[in-house]
Amino acid sequence: MSLIDIRKRSLTVETVYHEGGPRPAKPLRMAAACAVVRNPYAGRYEPDLLPFMAELRDLGTQLAEELVDALGGAGQVEAYSKAAIVGTSGELEHGAVWHEAGGWAMRQVLGEPKAIVPSAKAVAHTGYRLMVPLHYIHAAYVRSHFNSVEVGIQDAPRPDEILFALVMADGGRIHARLGGLTRDQVSVHDGQR
């Protein structure tokens, strides 16, 4: 029997046309795909979380593919992240299974970018909103792509659920102008610089 029982999913796409300055040639799109899953370990301690993590890879792939489609293809994606909100009958480690499952899925769908996939996680009440950090998919130090996206669903997670989210964007901040490493200066290809 599968450990994955999805109650609902959501896809949100935010389009930013400007931040008070000039309009760019192309607006920024940031998308979040979420799945609300029953927590198979709610209310009890489970020493072995690896089977749950392994099964979540398929869900991660589905969410990553949905985001890529929403943003117009893998070649459009420039920033990414992941998040988990664990209901109050769970523990933070139940959300940490998403580090490998969600991160692995995004890397696979996007052609193995090198930069670490940033993340956020929390144990929280139903309706909690979480700010998720974003950065450039090929080099973590590209300052123009440091951004954040809010994830959450009004009726989730219930105490015995987990909300898992993947986030992608098709660019950096609209009016980024604070210097630092730029996309075209990435040369080391180590995921950092």
Image (cartoon, helix red, strand yellow):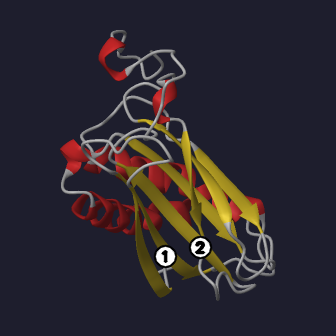
- Residue 129 appears in the picture as rendered: yes
Identity of the amino acid at label 1?
A: Ala
Q: CA distance from mark 2 to mark 1?
A: 6 Å
Instruction: From the top left corner, tell me how far across and down residue 13 is, in percent.
Output: 39, 66
- Residue 48 appears in the picture as rendered: no
Picture disc at residue 44:
none
Kindly indicate the quadrant of the structure image that contains residue 95. bottom right
Badge 1 crowding class, 10 Å Cα cut-off, few under 14, some 14 to 19, many 20 or more, is many
Residue indicated by mark 1: 35
Picture disc at residue 163:
2
Instruction: From the top left corner, tell me how far across and down residue 26 is, in percent.
Output: 26, 46
Task: Answer above or below: position of 27 versus 179.
Answer: below
Front residue of 122/133: it is 133
Badge 2 crowding class, 10 Å Cα cut-off, few under 14, some 14 to 19, many 20 or more, is many
Helix, strand or loop at mark 1: strand
In the image, what residue occupies the spot 54% across and 21% down? 178
In the image, what residue occupies the spot 38% across and 54% down? 17
Task: Answer above or below: position of 126 versus 75.
Answer: below
**Which callout, 2 or 1, points at the residue further toward the start of the chain?**
1
Indicate the quadrant containing the C terminus: top left, top right, bottom left or bottom right.
top left
Identity of the amino acid at label 2?
A: Leu
Task: Answer above or below: position of 75 versus 164.
Answer: above
In the image, what residue occupies the spot 64% across and 83% down? 156
Q: Is residue 160 left or right of residue 30?
A: right
In the image, what residue occupies the spot 42% across and 38% down? 172
Task: Answer above or below: position of 153 versus 181.
Answer: below
Label 2 with label 1: CB-CB less than 8 Å: yes
